[in-house]
Image (tube, rainbow, N blue to C red):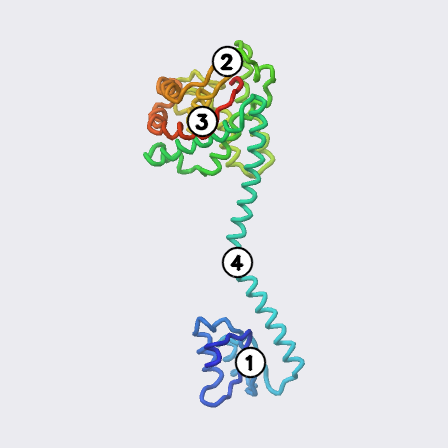
Amino acid sequence: MKILEKNIPDLILLDVEMPEMNGYEVIKIIKNNKETEHIPIIFLTAKNDAESELKGLSLGAIDYIIKPFSPPLLLKRIEVHLLVESQKKELIYYNDNLLKMVEAKTKTVVELQNAVLKTVAELVEYRDDITGEHIERTQSYLAILVRALTKYGLYTEEISSWNMDLVLQSAQLHDVGKIAIRDSILQKPDKLTVEEFERIKEHTTFGEKVIERIKQSTADQAFLEYAKIFAATHHEKWDGSGYPRGLRGEDIPLLGRLMAIADVYDALISARPYKKAFTHKEAVTVIAAGKGTQFDPVLADLFLGVADEFEAVAARANTAPAGNG
């Protein structure tokens, strides 16, 4: 017992009949000590009756070997028990670290997914002559609005069911439907004709169809459902005058109403071939004027309360010339 205070062996061979303290008393002490309870114990004894063997095993011994014994057989049984204990330790380590391993793997997969999606989204935006910063800024604006919703307890029932990381990632695909719009329209330096603008409108429904097609071949339904809503509804207006479906009020999903503000603000402060970039103050004025007509009045007021945060995001990135839409 004094030895065990300083050294923890891989296995103990324990006799039963010993002076001062018998083997059964020893194993009880060992198994009741957190420092030593894990040590495997094999009884090696001349007590060969079934009752003694059952008692030894009941007290926690992993084996019960009766004297006289075969040394090679004893060594082999020790070898087997040490192998089992080694595998048990590996299993315990694996189980203890499984959550960390899963989290690390999941993080890697999510990072890869996000990188691929960002690249695809940026390729679409480059066709419209927009820098990738548009994607990053709109994601930042959304994050600001969502934090404000949480802070002020607005639309709590709806946002409580959201996976915020997936919401922000999926926002990258809000304009993915532009991949179907001709370059002559996307990159036109002049104001669009009525017919050309009708073609531009189709990027919402086409984006919705593209994402729905992807949904049919993947299990990541939540992420794609968010993306589908963003793509289909970010041009709807509170008064029903938006497109593609002319949805009105709260019939427009909250994600679409949020993206409408983020997207319009970024479009206003960005230089376009047919217009100069608005100042932050001018963009705020436009959105305030659209309260209750173009924008959800609750969200418009929310935006006004965090407009300085939008300005800070815009200041960190240089706006670039952009196309139509």
Between 293 and 140, the one nearer to me in the picture: 140
Q: Residue at x 57, y 15 (%)?
A: 185
Q: Distance between the residues labelled 1 and 2?
A: 89 Å
Q: Which of marks 1 and 3 is nearer the N terminus?
A: 1
Amino acid type of disc 3? Answer: Met
The mark that comes first in sequence, 4 or 3, is 4
Q: Three-letter amino acid code at disc 4?
A: Asn
Q: Which residue is drawn at 59% across and 33% down?
A: 216
SS of the residue under disc 3: helix
Q: State the residue position of label 4.
A: 95
Is tag 3's residue or tag 2's residue first in the polypeptide sequence?
Answer: 3
On the image, the x and y values in percent for residue 212 come to: 56, 29
Residue annotated with mark 2:
274
In contact (CB < 8 Å): disc 1 and disc 2: no
Q: Is mark 4 on a helix, strand or loop?
A: helix
Does residue 287 appear anywhere in the picture? yes
Determine the CA span between mark 3 and mark 2: 23 Å
Residue beneath disc 1: 13
Which residue position is annotated with label 3?
259
Question: Regarding mark 2 in the picture, which secondary structure is present there?
Answer: loop
Residue 31 at x, y percent in the picture: 46, 74
Question: What residue is rendered at 43% in x and 26% in y?
Answer: 262
* Tag 3–tag 2 contact (CB < 8 Å): no
| In this rendering, position of residue 285 left or right of residue 167 | left
Q: Where is residue 158 in the image (x, y as percent from the top left)?
A: 39, 34
Judge whether residue 291 can be spotted in this image: no
Cα separation, mark 4 vs mark 1, equals 29 Å
Callout in the foreground (4, 3): 3
Mark before the other along the chain sequence, 4 or 1: 1
- Residue mark closest to the camera, 1 vs 2: 2
Question: How far is the residue under mark 1 from the one under mark 3?
Answer: 71 Å
